[in-house]
């Protein structure tokens, strides 16, 4: 049976989640292990084959020295975006067991009761750098690339600090009990391959090669990455996450059939009807062609407007047609 889970499977499309958010902020849910446990468990009633820890990729930034908040309707806001070398020099390489102990506590709580694997995660160093420098979401990553192209030494120091934190953080999650980890380098697809290879790949490689030695599967994910799949594969990951614009069969050929792939239904196809959702799910299954090593997922996270029933229909469909 092809395993299925969804990026952002816990979140605003679920009524139980919205209910908790009436009384708790997003950061409350992340920082209280009992609440993080509860939210992580919510989507399991849909029949998914894995739980993903409820947390956020930005959590390490605050103890590193870059405080932020989630502004209503706007997404994350970094209070003092990084613009200078001296700000980069001041960022701390944290001990995740100390600074993010609440994440490890949530993992330990979940491991006592889960009967499906638990996926831990962290942001990729480029994606984290982009939030630090842009101060939030960005359309073109102009400030990030200006630093990367114009001040490569400062960029390298920033990437070394971020990738060391990501490495330690993923290792700590595995030590606490995570059965697999995913690195969300969500925005790396905005780079040309040559720039990825020069400015990002060495840092990602150091993280992924090290985390792979723990023995757990490591999922390497980005969006808009059709042109980068080989370079991402070369940087590491036992599983490559594929975005929804890239045909899964084409992506798998580029990655190589000796690696597993994850993906890649368009999250928007869940918004319409059960029939349309199932049709899109089948297209992904057809592209995977029944090869072993396919993890069914979306090509990016579930959208808040998604009807829960459509998600359930896709889970059931994937299980039914891939049952052996
Ligand atoms: O997948 C899961 O169920 C685990 C939970 C999870 C969250 N964030 C909780 C969250 C995961 C895996 C993330 C990763 C994350 N966070 C990424 C990488 C994945 C991606 O989507 O590319 C990024 C870029 C972030 C940073 C972030 N956090 C942004 C840009 C936003 C605002 C966007 C929005 O949809 O409003 C968040 C907020 C956030 N993190 C929510 C959730 C469930 C929104 C819900 C809320 O406000 O309650």
Image (spheres, rainbow, N blue to C red):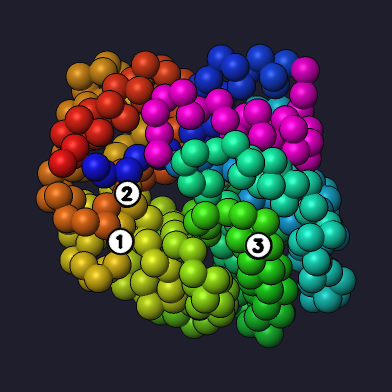
| Boundaries of the magenta span | 23-49
| Residue mark closest to the camera, 1 vs 3 | 3
Q: Quadrant of residue 126?
A: bottom right
Q: Earlier in the sequence, mark 1 or mark 2?
A: 1
Residue name at image x 81 percent, y 66 percent: 94
Task: Between residue 226 and residue 171, name the one nearer to us.
Answer: 171
The x, y position of residue 182, in whole percent, is 50, 56
The residue carrying pointer 2 sits among few (fewer than 14), some (14 to 19) or many (20 or more) residues within 10 Å by Cα, namely many
- The x and y percentages for residue 40 are 59, 34
Find out whether the residues at labels 1 and 2 contact each other: C-beta distance under 8 Å. Answer: yes
- Secondary element under disc 2, as helix, strand or loop, is strand
Main SS of the magenta segment?
helix
**Residue 86's x, y, as percent?**
85, 74
Against 280, is 141 above or below? below
Q: Secondary structure at mark 1?
A: strand
Q: Position of residue 249 (x, y in %)?
A: 17, 56
Instruction: Tell me the CA gap for discs 1 and 3.
Output: 23 Å
First of labels 1, 3 by sequence position: 3
Q: Which residue is tagged 1?
A: 260
Element type at mark 3: helix
Ligand 1 quarter of the rendering = top right
Q: Which image quarter: residue 235?
A: bottom left
**Residue denoted by label 2:** 295
| Residue at position x 69%, y 41% in the image | 109
Residue 121 visible to the viewer:
no
Left or right relative to 27: residue 116: left
Kindly report the distance in space between the C-alpha atoms of the residues bearing marks 2 and 3: 24 Å
Foreground pick, 236 / 171: 171
- Do the residues under discs 2 and 3 have CB atoms within 8 angstroms? no
Q: Marks 1/2: CA distance?
A: 8 Å
């Amino acid at each position: 049976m092809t395993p299925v889970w969804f990026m952002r499977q816990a979140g605003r499309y679920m009524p139980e989640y919205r209910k908790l958010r009436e009384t708790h902020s997003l950061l409350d849910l992340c920082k209280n292990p009992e609440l993080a446990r509860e939210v992580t468990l919510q989507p399991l009633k849909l029949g998914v084959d894995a739980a993903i820890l409820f947390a956020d990729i930005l959590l390490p930034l605050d103890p590193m020295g870059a405080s932020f908040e989630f502004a209503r309707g706007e997404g994350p806001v970094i209070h003092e975006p990084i613009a200078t070398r001296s700000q980069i020099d001041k960022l701390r390489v944290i001990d995740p067991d100390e600074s993010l102990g609440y994440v490890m506590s949530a993992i330990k709580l979940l491991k006592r009761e889960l009967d499906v694997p638990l996926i831990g995660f962290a942001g990729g160093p480029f994606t984290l750098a982009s939030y630090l420098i842009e101060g939030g979401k960005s359309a073109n990553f102009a400030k990030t690339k200006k630093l990367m192209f114009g001040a490569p030494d400062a960029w390298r120091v920033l990437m070394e600090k971020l990738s060391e934190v990501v490495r330690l953080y993923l290792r700590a999650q595995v030590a606490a009990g995570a059965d697999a980890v995913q690195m969300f380098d969500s925005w790396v697809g905005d780079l040309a391959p040559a720039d990825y290879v020069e400015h990002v790949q060495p840092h990602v490689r150091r993280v992924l090669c090290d985390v792979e030695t723990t023995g757990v599967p490591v999922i390497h994910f980005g969006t808009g990455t059709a042109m980068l799949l080989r370079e991402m594969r070369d940087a590491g990951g036992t599983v490559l996450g594929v975005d929804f614009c890239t045909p899964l069969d084409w992506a798998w050929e580029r990655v190589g059939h000796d690696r597993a792939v994850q993906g890649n239904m368009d999250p928007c196809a869940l918004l319409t009807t059960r029939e349309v959702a199932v049709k899109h799910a089948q297209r992904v299954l057809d592209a995977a062609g029944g090869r072993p090593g396919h993890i069914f997922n979306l090509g990016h996270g579930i959208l808040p407007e998604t009807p829960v029933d459509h998600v359930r229909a896709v889970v059931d469909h994937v299980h039914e047609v891939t049952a052996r």
